[in-house]
Image (cartoon, rainbow, N blue to C red):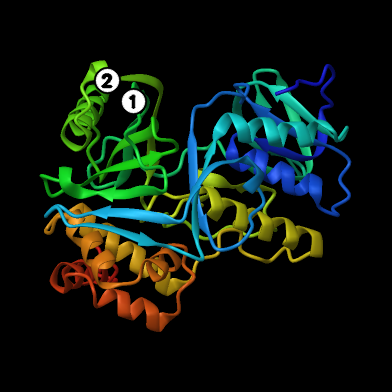
Amino acid sequence: MPESPIIKPSHTFILAGGGMAGLSLAYYLHSSKIDFESMLIIDQTIKNTRDKTWCYWSDQAETFDACVEHRWDQLWFHSFANQNDKFSIAPFSYRKIQSDTWYAFVQKELSSNPKVQFLQAKVLGFNYAGRYACVQTDAGKFTATSKIFDSISPYPCELANPKHLKQHFVGLTIETNFPIFEPDAAHLFDFRIAHTKACEFMYVLPTSTRVALFEHTYFSGELKEKEHYIAQIKSYLVGAYGLGEEDYLIVEEEAGIIPMTLSEEDPQNLQAKIIRIGTSGGFVKATTGYSFLRTQRKLIALVENLQTGRFGSVVNESKPFKKWMDRVFLRVLVDQKIKGSRVFESLFQKNKPQLILRFLEEQTTVWEDLKLMTSVPTIPFMQAAFKIALERLPFPKK
């Protein structure tokens, strides 16, 4: 991340956070017809490493397809009972981006704009000075004459709270001594390892006959020690591929904790001076943990609304019925009255994969949603829906 030698104290836009959400927004603002005087991007670290893998599916060309390392037109689904299905997802394709490639692509584009400045500093907080919003950093105070976009404030999810669902994982990219993988299909879910009621699976992305990413993933409230995930991956490599530790080299490692909770806060709109985006703004799809394409689409809409003066528009718009479905599904995973794997098994075994992918991106109609709802085990979902309704009744306080 290039750092400007002289940083002005006042800017049209300030982006607190230069990760995926912040840099994406900067890219769209830079590419828009919005006439801004200057934009400052603040982050504590220089984003240039391969620290994340982003995946998404789409049936059309997307903004950052040039950064795609690999794409798959087929997916594997493995059930706990060892039913293995390989299916085409056409016209969709599943796409993988490495973070270092993406950072370099976006930063190169932004570096061509003299109105964009970068500052490597720690954000300490936000406040107001009259009608302007300010951000306080360890390098000084900076004012936004239009808006501050905050992608670093924590999302309301308690890591130690088992009732707050998280997607947590460790991933290892390995290179084997001999060709063994089939890179024509990604393994979206492998539930053959799901021996508890927690939603636990292996996620496998083979990019060549010798290189693949393996992520041991949970949708649950209780985190594990790092060694647990790695031990599970190594056991899986032995059981699924017959690979002992002498048969491969670990070339990369990544880990993540993604909140899978729904915020109860009122939705933000563009009239606000400080707007949360990315994970901080609830852009992550709570029931899947996917965020890359979802973030792009929300930010494209945000910039379009800014450009056309629709300041009353909601930043993170969500249809009430979709949000209710997410809430019920999350409660099912938290309560663990049924194995999380069984829910996904029912979905994939009883529905076309294209319908499921559209459903996960909230592109389905109400009738399609109802069809999908009838394909999952009914009783635990009814119990979860009843609990949620009961909690929301306006009982008088004692």
**Whether label 2 touches label 1, CB < 8 Å:** yes
Residue 51 point in image, percent of width and height: 49, 27
Is residue 24 toward the left or the right of residue 36 in the image?
left
Q: Nearer the viewer, residue 276 or 260?
A: 260
Residue at 66% x, 44% y is: 66
Residue 62 point in image, percent of width and height: 63, 55
Image: 248 above or below 257:
above
Q: CA distance from mark 2 to mark 1?
A: 8 Å
Q: Nearer the viewer, residue 315 or 301?
A: 301
Amino acid tagged 1: Phe
Residue 247 circle label: 2
Can you name the residue that lies furthest to the bottom here? 367
Which residue is under mark 1? 178
Amino acid tagged 2: Asp
Image: 299 above or below 234:
below
Secondary element under disc 1, as helix, strand or loop, is loop
Image: 76 above or below 309:
above
Residue at 49% x, 70% y is: 363
Residue 323 in view (yes/no): yes
Is residue 191 toward the left or the right of residue 266 in the image?
left
Figure quadrant of residue 120 = top right
Which callout, 2 or 1, points at the residue further toward the start of the chain?
1
